[in-house]
Image (cartoon, rainbow, N blue to C red):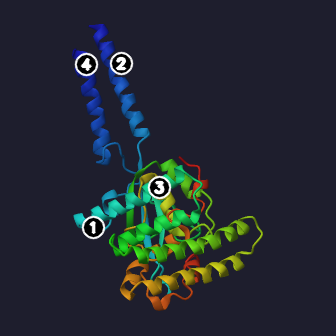
Amino acid sequence: MKICYIFVFTVLFGMSFVYADGGEGKYRHSDDPNFDAGMLKGPVRSDVEKFRNDFYSRKDFELAKKQKENPGKEIAEEIAEQFENRIDFALGIDFPMEKREIIGTSLKKMHFKLEPLRKALEDGNLSKDYYFSIVDSESEKFLGVCSDVLTDQEFEDLFQFKKTEIKGTFRRVLKTSSPK
Amino acid sequence: MFNKVIRFFCLFFLSIITVTVINASASVYIWAMKKPVAFAPFSWLDHTYVCVGNSNNCYTCPPTYTKTGGNPAVGGYGDGDDAVCYAYCTLSYGVNGVCHQHSNRVLYPAGQTLAYCGVTGYTFSVGMWGTYGTNFNSCDCD
């Protein structure tokens, strides 16, 4: 019996190091002496904001996990599902279904067009410049549809830029890859 | 008495081994950093990169782009080896995704995404390449 107590005590004692180390059960800190996980959690957020962030982040992750485990779905369908989460978060779950459908259809249409071109590019049958010019124009069309459906404020809440800045958005994103 | 001492030491070392195994398979902290693109007219965009375990082990796409500075965006605990594996999974910039999708891949073992931590330009990039990039299913890291 005593042996059992000793065993339990020793295990618990050992486990306490693991828990105390990371402060989060099985986790442990980095080996970096300057590392402070607490500081990396960013600015203090309200409980509601934190709950909302965690909830939607989990939703994104679970959706992608499901898609990864069950491949075979069209990439356009997958991206449209993922984009729905962005709408939920930015514009609310009560955002009108008709508007969602218009945006979703336009997004899928863009990807149905781009997917074979992407494959051709990956197979070396298409130049990158030509592919990017198509993506540029298709993405502008998609943003144009969103611009028609959404109010100025909704558009800005969703995309973080104004309707007047649609032109050349894809090129602007590409150029951010230039090393500084 | 001798037997008891032997038993005690056996159990003690067994528990030490148990704790070591738990620690060895434990996760590391994986966190994303966001940094506004400094030059106009791109200042609305946030560049992102992810560090695995320590700030000297950071990844982004394209790999030559900055991996220092900025503000913390999101983080969580996950398998560091898987995270590094995802960091090296092929992602052609602008074709399969951009730094946002690359960061989400590295964060994947931690179950976190950049989605709701105020990364500007993120919604557009999700619309173009999805949460993890268009070729995520080809990454074999789990």
Q: Are marks 4 and 1 on the same chain?
A: yes
Letter of the chain that mark 3 sits on in the rendering: B
| Residue A49: mark | 1
Report whether A169 appears left or right of B30. right
Q: Quadrant of residue B115?
A: bottom left
| Residue A4: mark | 4
Tell me how far mark 2 sits from mark 3, CA to CA. 40 Å
Q: Residues within 10 Å of mark 2 (few under 14, many from 20)?
A: few
**A141 or B68, nearer to the observer:** A141
- Measured as percent of width and height from the top left, residue B79 is found at 46, 48
- Quarter of the image where the C terminus of chain A is located: bottom right
Q: Are marks 4 and 3 on the same chain?
A: no
Does label 4 or label 1 sit earlier along the sequence? 4
Tell me how far mark 2 sits from mark 1, CA to CA. 50 Å
B89 relative to B100, above or below: above
A29 relative to A153, above or below: above
